[in-house]
Amino acid sequence: MRVKSILNQVEKYKDFVYERVRWKDEGGERALAVEVRPRAHRPGRCSGCGEPGPGYDRLPARAFEYVPLWGMRVYFVYALRRVQCARCGVKVEAVPWGQGKQTLTRSYMQFLATWAGRVSWQEVARFFHTSWEKVFHAVSWQVEWGLAHRDLAGIKALGIDETAWQRGHRYLTVVYQLDAQARRLLWVGEQRSAQTLLKFFRFFGPQRTRQLRFICSDLWRPYLEVVAQKAGQALHVLDRFHVAMNLNQAVDQVRIEESQELRRRGLRPLLTRTRWCLLKRPEHLTSQQEIKLAHLLRANLRTVRAYLLKEDLGFFWTCQGVLWARAFLKGWYHRVLRSQIEPLKKVARMLRAHEPLLLNWFRARKQISSGPTEGLNNRLQLTLRKAYGFRTFRAAEIAVYHTLGALPEPESTHRFC
């Protein structure tokens, strides 16, 4: 079987013919050069409008890199025609295997982008004897095509969060779709400011914003203000994960302060190595941690009182309706503010200031939570680590859209597994 026969099976174009296959020397390595010519009486098509036009002249032959065959590089060699377009003037013809001035064929870019979704970009470049930049260009092409052709209709629920992507407190603002039928990344922006989130709502548009029913976010004030301004009709539900995180931070602060105080007074170090006993959920404790926690709960310590108040708030999420939840919160605030535990009192004041947003979780009938958002954030962090870090926001943006965007892919003559 000839190479031309294989190409005609997997990459056949009606306006072009594979003419000859020859060896090409690349610095001591052999590659296959496949010469391509247009079929007789087939005019070139304008790269601007796509309409056929009479020939003008030819440019020097160019090599377009194709999917490797048997470990050897494969190139399509073709001298592009220029056409005299009635609408656009003199333009270089459009070829079905190429995109603009790219030296990679569409199939090879899709091949590299498919592998880049499974392993790191560096590994893809090493496996297929290409450069990191070519892998980046391949993924960028696929992502840009997917963003231009994705469907944004019928979105009802959003999750808004921030995540660190570089050292030095550099954050990304990420917006996810949290509908039951689709959980994907919708938008990513640099920094975690009100201006960044306003850019999302400008991109999303007022018509789609008015259709939103639920929005889930954390307690970051710029997000709260922008959501109230732009999507006030949607039920804004506070992120349950971040409520628990703030409580855990308060309990840990109390533990550290009291442990230092016991050490200064020369008393028995009861709080040594008890951090995770106090921060983990009871059902996730190991047997040794359960024993240590049982001994600790017998002591009359501020840390123990803080832990019990933190666990007490867990019953809030099991209340049956807004009235019961409001009554529970009122009693919990009263107990915390009388406890004289300042870090916990600070959290209680913050939650009381945002009580309507907490109660929206019950008004939404517990249909939306931060669980999917945190799961997508974990995948986002894995994507950033898998690529061994990105120096530019553009590269990070392309990577997370490629992994989490659930973007449509351009049609190809064949699929890559």
Image (tube, rainbow, N blue to C red):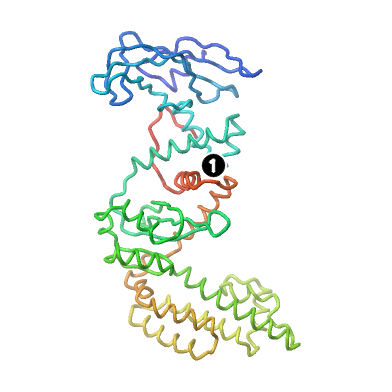
Q: Position of residue 22 (x, y in %)?
A: 54, 11
Q: Residues within 10 Å of mark 1 (few under 14, many from 20)?
A: few
Please indicate whether residue 348 sits to the left or right of residue 129 in the image: left
The residue indicated by pointer 1 is 118
Residue 287 sits above or below residue 371 on the image? below
Q: What residue is shown at x 36% (from left), y 22% (from top)?
A: 94
Q: Position of residue 370 (x, y in %)?
A: 44, 64
Amino acid under disc 1: Arg
Residue at the right extreme?
266
Please indicate whether residue 227 sits to the left or right of residue 166 in the image: left
Residue 255 sits above or below residue 159 on the image? below
Find numbered disc 1 in the image and state the secondary structure of the residue it sits on: loop
Name the one closer to the observer, 162 or 118: 162
Q: Quadrant of residue 356?
A: bottom left
Q: Count the marks: how many?
A: 1
Residue 292 sits above or below residue 12 on the image? below
Residue 310 sits above or below residue 112 on the image? below
Q: What residue is shown at x 29% (from left), y 62% (from top)?
A: 230
Q: Position of residue 37 (x, y in %)?
A: 41, 12
Name the one closer to the observer, 261 or 356: 261
Q: Position of residue 386 (x, y in %)?
A: 58, 47
Name the one closer to the observer, 50 or 318: 50
